Amino acid sequence: MYLSGFKHAPYLMIKPDSNLDSIDPDFLQNKYVVRLSGAFDESFIQRFVQIFNHITHLDVGHQFGVDNNFIYDFPKLEGVAVPLYRDSDFVLDCARLPKTLRQLDLSVYTKKKISNMEALATSLEQLSISGFKEKDLSSLASLKSLTALSFKTASIKSLNGIEKLIHLKRLSLGGVRSLVDLTAIGSLQKLKFLEIDIAWKLQDCSPIGQLGELEVLQLMDCKNLASIQFVRQMPKLRQLYTLGTTMINDYDTTPAEHVPIFFGSLDKKYTKMYPEKEIREGQRGWSSYH
């Protein structure tokens, strides 16, 4: 049992050989995310639940050997990370999660491995998903309290359903190779931070221009980007990124003249380059917007 991770975001690693009879008192102060890693047996998990029953943040992403139903035994959970593997019998019943839950991280998302998601409609604020296999976001439309939504990989073709999530301030669309339609994004009038990554088929980003409160826009590895003309109508945009394989295909960078920080303008094909905007001072990231 030991602390790991980064200085500003440490977590408590617990493995099958961890000594539950001799625990540093600091580890019991509920100051860290508790992460399980390894193949555990039932007796260890039962003892673990008894000792750490008070914890607020739990990560069971690398726990195997014992059914994950024990996560329902933590009444004060505010955040939980759990995998939904197809070859596992475990089905996450959101109705059994505590009403205190604010953050949910789902890896290897499988629709048949989750139920009663609407039970989190008024409590869940942050949702992160990898391996999302749906074609749009209709299955998440009930989560109207969300302020942050993140996909590590997703098969979506459109954002249909996201128009219900009007309280979103942060949206990260990662690994969205099939995404072609952003029309529904115009409803997110509170959005401050938007990242779109590996959207190889996406050409028309003009709906983003309707986001009057957007401050940070990251278009990463969007190699078929038609234009950034829509940026002209975004007075609050302070950071624009068109990096990786992203290419502005009409070669016109002048719509970004008013944007203080612009990474990705340095290509000889572009109408104008902005070396003075390729700076790091004043950058704001995902965690800046709560």
Image (cartoon, rainbow, N blue to C red):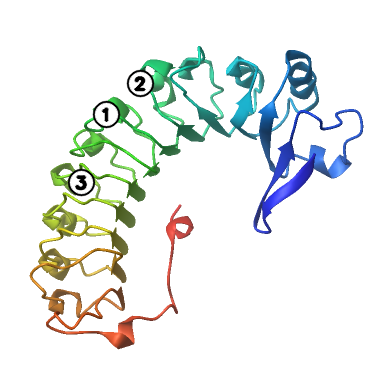
Query: Quick one: 57 or 153, which is closer to the camera?
Result: 153
Point out the frontmost of discs 3 and 1.
1
Residue 78 x/y as whole percent: 58, 34
32 over 280 or under it: above or below: above
Label 1 packing within 10 angstroms: few (<14), some (14-19), many (20+): some
For mark 3, what is the residue?
Answer: 185
Mark 1 element type? loop
User: What is the C-alpha distance between the residues marked 3 and 2?
Assistant: 23 Å
Image point (15%, 58%), residue name: 224
Q: CA distance from mark 2 to mark 1?
A: 8 Å
* Residue at image coords 26%, 32%: 137
Residue 8 placement (x, y as % from top left): 65, 58
Q: Along the line of sight, which residue is nearer the eye, 209 or 226?
A: 226
Q: Quadrant of the N terminus?
A: top right
Is any part of residue 232 visible from this angle? yes
Between disc 3 and disc 2, whose residue precedes? 2
Disc 2 designates what residue?
A: 111
**Residue name at image x 28 percent, y 29 percent:** 141
Q: Mark 3 or mark 2, which is nearer to you?
A: 2
Give me the C-alpha separation between circle 3 and circle 1.
Answer: 17 Å
Q: Is residue 115 visible?
A: no
Marks 2/1 in contact by CB < 8 Å: the verdict is yes
Q: Quadrant of residue 216?
A: bottom left
**Of callouts 2 and 1, which one flags the residue occurring earlier in the amino acid sequence?**
2
